[in-house]
Image: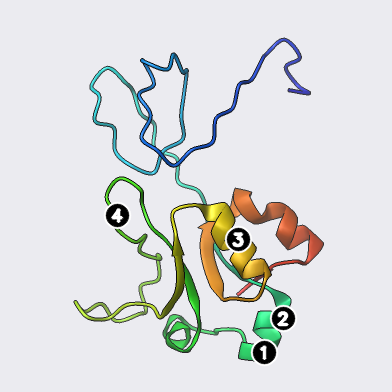
Amino acid sequence: MEQYADVELDLDFTNRNVDLIEKDLTWQFAWVPLDDSRLMARRVQPHLNLVASPEYIAQRGRPNKASDLASHECLQFRFVRSGKVFKWPISAIPEAPDTRLPTRLTANENMMLIQAAKRGLGIACVPDFTVREALASGTLVRS
């Protein structure tokens, strides 16, 4: 807005599936594939961060390798449309049908996960742009 003073923004934050054409929206960030062939998509891959509060890390220790997460509380993201839990991009955790991260909280909203992480409830895996300020202020640290 500072750079383009003539641009008017109307932001709507939701975890629902939105019909862009019906709502007359120009663009949307989504975590799911497009079902509507009238739309174009561009893949944007955000950088993901594992974050926790400094207090949580002081109490539980910082995981040094992926397998260390087995002894931590993990805050998980669940996709609204599919109901599936987001798989953290950590290849060192052995993948088996019954192997999963120990989960303390699952939510379909990253801001909820960030608030839980700030309160010391566990480690969250979230896009970097959602925690930039919290990392800069020290309310969250990379884990």
Please identify, in this view, whether the residue under mark 1 or under mark 4 is nearer the observer: 4
Residue 137 percent across, percent down from the top left: 80, 61
Residue 80 percent across, percent down from the top left: 35, 48
The residue singled out by tag 2 in the image is 55
Q: CA distance from mark 2 to mark 4?
A: 31 Å
Q: Residue at x 33, y 42 (%)?
A: 32
Query: In this orientation, which residue lies closer to the viewer: 134 or 83?
Result: 83
Name the N-terminal-most of marks 3 and 4: 4
- Give, as a three-letter code, the residue at label 3: Ile
The residue singled out by tag 3 in the image is 114
- Image marks 3 and 4: residues in contact by CB distance under 8 Å: no
Side (left or right) of 120 relative to 35:
right
The residue singled out by tag 4 in the image is 83
- Image marks 2 and 4: residues in contact by CB distance under 8 Å: no
- Give, as a three-letter code, the residue at label 4: Gly
- Image marks 3 and 1: residues in contact by CB distance under 8 Å: no
**Mark 2 crowdedness (10 Å alpha carbons): few <14, some 14-19, many ≥20:** some
Disc 4 on helix, strand or loop? loop
The residue singled out by tag 1 in the image is 59
